[in-house]
Image: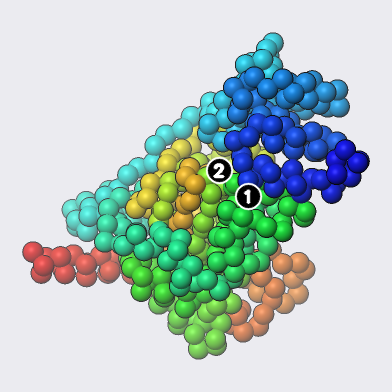
Amino acid sequence: LAKKGQIESSLQYFRAAVRADPTNYEYMNNLGVTEMRTQSFRKASYRFFNSLKLSSGEYAKAWKNLEELQEFVSEDDYITYYHDWLGLRDDNLPVVGVLPDIEVSYGIRHKTKTLPIIDYETFFDPSNETARSYATGYKPYMLINGMDHWDLDVLGNRDVMIEHFKDSRVDYYPHNMREEDVRPYFNDLASAIGNFDNPTGLFDRIDASERTAYIQWNMKDNEWKKMKELGMDLPPMFRSDDVWIDKCFAPIHRIDDFLVKTHWRMVLIGQEGAGMFNHKDTLHSASFQAQLSGRKRWHLCSDAYDEQMYKAGQVNTFSPNYSKFPKALDMDCYDVTVETGQMLYYPQNYWHQTRNLDPFTMSVSGTLVTDSNKNEISHEFRKECNPGKTGSRIFSYEERLCEGLQQCMDHWQIKSWEEDVTADFETIMKNKKLEL
């Protein structure tokens, strides 16, 4: 097809070949040539760099094609492509000879620190005020030993998920979520996970050549309850929404509308290299994530560094282009890898970017209303519940749903989240004393 000049028609087959064998440097190079002919110069450069990486710098055709590509792009663009490629994966390293006379930085040069690690057991020690200050939601932290009683052989197993949830609707991103403007395909869970290995029928429409697919599964109420039946037992501070969700939305039959439209509770499934671009949550909410399978790398930064982050999706915080975004050098953030069986929590307005580090990773995530963010979340919901608003950032106006939200907002002002959490802690402590 390509030799006949049918470049667009040939593209899907070159993509499929790379997906079938991502270690073949010749396939990678051929895809790059095809993309260069369609003037997709950034993507083409990535393929040539990958081809050289796979061939240990020995594949002559990839070098020749890089020389040709430089005739079509400026030197600044070429340097940017190379820098951005270095930041796509943790194992992308400089290729000797690509830019012999120019030093291109990669990786993190701004200040980073490790996330505070809190042992779940210390939350229930009344004398440990430091741990209690984390539990009440004002600081980010990693929680260990909070999932020791979960059956991760069940909850972290893709086949078990398919068995119980095969028809559940998910947002499927076969082309990853590294960039802000990508859009999902709506699919059932079984088909989406099946497409991880064999994305049949997609190559003619999108670039699914990389094995970096991502699933965002907005869970309905019955699905969340089924996860609990399978052994998900969240700590008190991560299940504080159970009562008010039922109270506000069950009588008007709007629980699923609320959960799905706000992305309140999610399961996130992805391949190695998949992840979410750098952003802040629209609702100004706090959030937790429990790692069910595999490892996930996080970069977390408070809103004190809004200026250094520029706009959502612009800065790859795992390898910022400091030449293009010089203010990023002034950041002081958290860089952490969450292992299977660990949990992570961040308060409202934290910038966060993620990257999966294993071939199959899965985590469960939830949104939280705390004493420190309830006013901001209420403000966002009031904007969405304005009948005269234009556009839809979170959901379209719906009278009954907004009636339930108003009841929730009233509840948040009356009932202290910290009091609820503390009460749960005290109950657990009493039970533990009785056990002893």
Q: Amino acid at mark 1?
A: Asn
Q: Is residue 345 visible?
A: yes
Residue 218 percent coordinates (x, y): 55, 67
Q: Among all residues in the image, which is located at the extreme bottom?
A: 251
Q: Among all residues in the image, which is located at the extreme top?
A: 101
Which label belongs to residue 273? 2
In the image, residue 294 above or below residue 258 = above
Residue 222 percent coordinates (x, y): 47, 78
Few, some or many C-alpha atoms within 10 Å of disc 2 (few <14, some 14-19, many ≥20)?
A: many
Tell me what residue is drawn at x 61 percent, y 25 percent.
55
Few, some or many C-alpha atoms within 10 Å of disc 1 (few <14, some 14-19, many ≥20)?
A: many
* Comes first in the chain, label 1 or label 2: 1
Coloured how?
rainbow
| Labelled pair 1, 2 in contact (Cβ < 8 Å) | yes
Tell me what residue is drawn at x 60 percent, y 28 percent.
54
Q: Label 1, on which residue?
A: 176
SS category of the residue bearing label 2 = loop
Residue 90 percent coordinates (x, y): 53, 33
Q: Nearer the viewer, residue 147 or 399?
A: 147
Q: Left of 51 or right of it: where is 69?
A: right
Q: How far separated are the C-alphas under marks 1 and 2?
A: 8 Å
Name the quarter where the C terminus is drawn. bottom left
Q: Amino acid at mark 2?
A: Gly
SS category of the residue bearing label 1 = loop
Q: Nearer the viewer, residue 301 or 153?
A: 153
Residue 36 in which image quadrant: top right
Residue 259 percent coordinates (x, y): 54, 72
In the image, residue 233 above or below residue 75 = below
Q: Is residue 170 visible?
A: no
